[in-house]
């Protein structure tokens, strides 16, 4: 893709160009201003004004109203957000309704290492995060873009099997060759 399209490496916080002047100017204005309240810790879920704006922005993208105090959580980045989710939701020894015993499927409840599906390619920290909280990573190759029908199938399977889906929507802004990004939150299964 890099050979076909001009691109900038923004991966892992290593951009290969300086920030634009307006960003530098806004930073200097903010840190040198009289409002000392801007230099304090913010509310644990994010600055209230930012939380409200994000709820409106993503509500428009998803075509639904989002309660900012329920559906928005601001973190210092995707790494922190994902790790917090994994810590909260993946526990080594979680109960699972069936277990493989001596090559045969046994019905009943068993303690297992929960499986976490990771779509490849992925950031290298995802695998380590899953293992750190006691999960077992399961890798699936990503194609350039899932069709609406494929996304509906994924959403339906998640709903049927009570699976949580954390969707990194970074691809929505970098679709090429006529591909369309389908947000899983758009689908009826998630309404």
Image: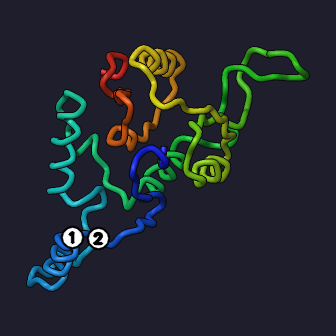
Which element carries disc 2, helix, strand or loop? loop
Q: Residue at x 49, y 20 (%)?
A: 154
x, y (%) of residue 7? 40, 53
Q: Is residue 1 left or right of residue 106?
A: left
**Image quadrant in which you'd find residue 184:** top left
Q: Residue at x 43, y 37 (%)?
A: 167
> How many neighbours does mark 2 have within 10 angstroms: few (below 14), some (14-19), or many (20 or more)?
few
CB-based contact (under 8 Å), mark 2 and mark 1: yes
Q: Is residue 85 left or right of residue 174?
A: right
Q: Residue at x 73, y 33 (%)?
A: 111
Q: Which residue is disc 2 drawn over?
A: 19
Q: Is residue 78 above or below residue 20?
A: above
Q: Which residue is disc 1 drawn over?
A: 23
Closer to the camera in the image, 156 or 183: 183
x, y (%) of residue 9? 44, 58
x, y (%) of residue 36? 15, 81
């Amino acid at each position: 893709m890099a050979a076909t399209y001009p691109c900038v490496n923004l991966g892992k916080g290593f951009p290969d160009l300086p920030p634009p002047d307006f960003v530098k100017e806004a930073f200097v204005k903010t840190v040198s201003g009289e409002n000392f309240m801007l230099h304090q810790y913010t509310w644990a879920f994010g600055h209230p004004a930012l939380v409200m704006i994000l709820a409106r922005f993503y509500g428009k993208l998803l075509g639904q109203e989002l309660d900012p105090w329920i559906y928005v959580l601001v973190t210092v980045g995707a790494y922190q957000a994902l790790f917090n989710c994994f810590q909260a939701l993946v526990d080594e020894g979680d109960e699972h309704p069936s277990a493989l015993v001596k090559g045969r499927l046994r019905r009943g409840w068993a303690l297992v290492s929960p499986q976490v599906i990771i779509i490849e390619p992925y950031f290298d920290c995802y695998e380590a995060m899953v293992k750190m909280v006691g999960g077992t990573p399961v890798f699936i190759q990503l194609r350039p873009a899932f069709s609406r029908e494929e996304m509906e199938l994924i959403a339906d399977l998640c709903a049927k099997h009570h699976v949580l889906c954390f969707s990194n929507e970074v691809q929505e802004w970098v679709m090429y060759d006529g591909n369309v990004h389908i947000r899983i939150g758009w689908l009826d299964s998630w309404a």
